Image (tube, rainbow, N blue to C red):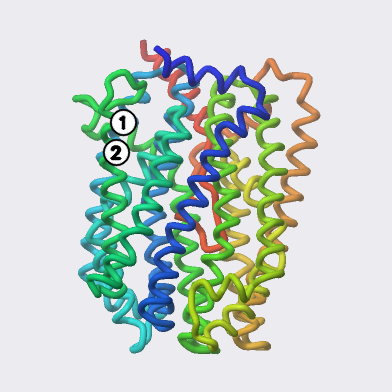
Amino acid sequence: MDNKKATLELGTKPVGSLLMQYALPAIIAMVASSLYNMVDSIFIGQGVGPLAISGLAITFPFMNLSGAFGAAIGVGASTLISVRLGQKDYDSAQNIFGNSITLNIIIGIVFATVCLLFLNPILMFFGATDKTIDYAREYMEIILAGNAITHLYFGMNAILRSASKPKTAMYITMFTVVLNTILDPIFIYIFHLGIRGAAYATILAQFIAMCWQFRIFSNQKEVLHLRRGIYALKKELVKRIVGIGISPFAMNACACLVVIFINTSLIKYGDEYAVGAYGIGNRLVFIFIMISIGINQGMQPIVGYNYGAKNYKRMMRAVNLAMIAATAATTLGWLVCEGIPEICVRLFTSDERLIKESVNGLRINAMVLCIIGFQMVVTNFFQSIGKAKISIFLSLSRQMIVLIPAIVILSSIWGVNGVWAALPVSDVVASLLALWFFAVYMKRYRHHKDDDENTPTEEKENERNYNYYTPRSGAAPRGMAPQAGAAIFEKRHNEENRNNQ
């Protein structure tokens, strides 16, 4: 079957051209996804007003929390599928695909129902004020009503990439962006729906894209396709999907808490305009973070396949190339955000007060953006080889362990500027930690390089510690590229099956 042959190139084609083949569509898709979010912000800022931008910024924790649940399923399922395809176990890949659809629907509906029941208290907790809560509520009511659609849309796009269809995933994302861009002004200006119009445009665009995805997976010639018998939840599959997805869930959930803390700190030391400035700055920085996430997503099937096939040299080659590319992307972001911040900010608003606050915040926020690409790849590299504790620590060091204390200390000294300054401080510390951990790992890796034919020492250690396994795009407020390696767990599972036979 042609689709099965397509997966074989992950273990045979030169890594450089393979990474470009997979990463370029993912990069385009992730940048398009970032622009997709920016479109709402631009039309809301220009068509509704500066306080509407602040209200939209209040919804970011909601997006991160919803993304946390989505990542728990999407990352877990797509990673397992990559490994199973590498092992030529197509039936298991099919069952994982079916279970991921069911889980996305269930979690999407349950999450939306609970949040809608307590929407006002949640928004106030997230940092909404009397001036912004109406905007935030109007937007989130529509977004939450379509939450299951959003989960399915992002989840199936991740699976398309794992099934050797990165270009298709890219086209679908680009289609969604274009459609959303067309629908936004129609709903906001022509139908006069305000911020609700942007939410309607988002969900409608995702729904149409989801229909396209279902049509693709309806083709019985595909390696992964819709068929009877794959949707009933199976305890072991759910356990493996969630087991791998715990890490990205934790990272995105922490991102939610961090954004809440940032919003409430900005309100405490500033006002609603400071929150709006953070929303604008985050959208701009996130474009370049999304490029790095795209690079990591392109790397994921290569790493997953070759880790499953125990071809560790190819795996490391992919990781090293990804580091170079991600660092180049974030360096470009640093140049843009530091060089022409006012031009960028004026895309979102014409309010001079909001422009001034946004430019100031953006320059501080992006001060060390150039080093973030490396940190992201290293964090996800450790996740991909099963070093969950290191991966989680590196992610949390950037999101919580350093950032929150830095906000508390620096804001008490410099006020609003202290909140902004805490962001680059946490990035520097997290990147230094990532460099140290990676240097130690590479020293050990080179020590065992001559024993490539045998199982690496790291894998043996991870096999004993798999219970700690807990890693675009939803995402952390500072960016997090989800990916993982499940080969260790799969090896144990296969050994148990042989022993039971």
Locate the C terminus by quadrant: top left
Q: Quadrant of residue 454?
A: top right
Q: Quadrant of residue 451?
A: top right
Can you give x and y, in whole percent of width and height, for residue 87 in the image? 48, 18
Q: Is residue 200 left or right of residue 223?
A: left
Q: Is residue 245 left or right of residue 345?
A: left
| In the rendered image, the vertical position of residue 196 relative to residue 312, given as above or below | below
Residue type of the residue flagged with mark 1: Ile
* Residue 479 in sight here: yes
Residue type of the residue flagged with mark 2: Trp
* Residue 468 in sight here: no
Which of the numbered marks, if any, corresponds to residue 212? 2
Which residue position is annotated with label 1?
A: 216
Few, some or many residues within 10 Å of mark 1 (<14, 14–19, 20+): some
Can you give x and y, in whole percent of width and height, for residue 126 in the image? 40, 75
What separation in Å lies between label 2 and label 1 (alpha carbons)? 6 Å
At horizontal 31% and vertical 37% (from top left) the residue drawn is 213
Which of the numbered marks, if any, corresponds to residue 326? none
CB under 8 Å between discs 2 and 1? yes
At horizontal 20% and vertical 69% (from top left) the residue drawn is 117
Locate the N terminus by quadrant: top left
At horizontal 35% and vertical 88% (from top left) the residue drawn is 131
| In the rendered image, the vertical position of residue 194 relative to residue 184, given as above or below | below
As helix, strand or loop, the secondary structure at mark 2 comes to helix
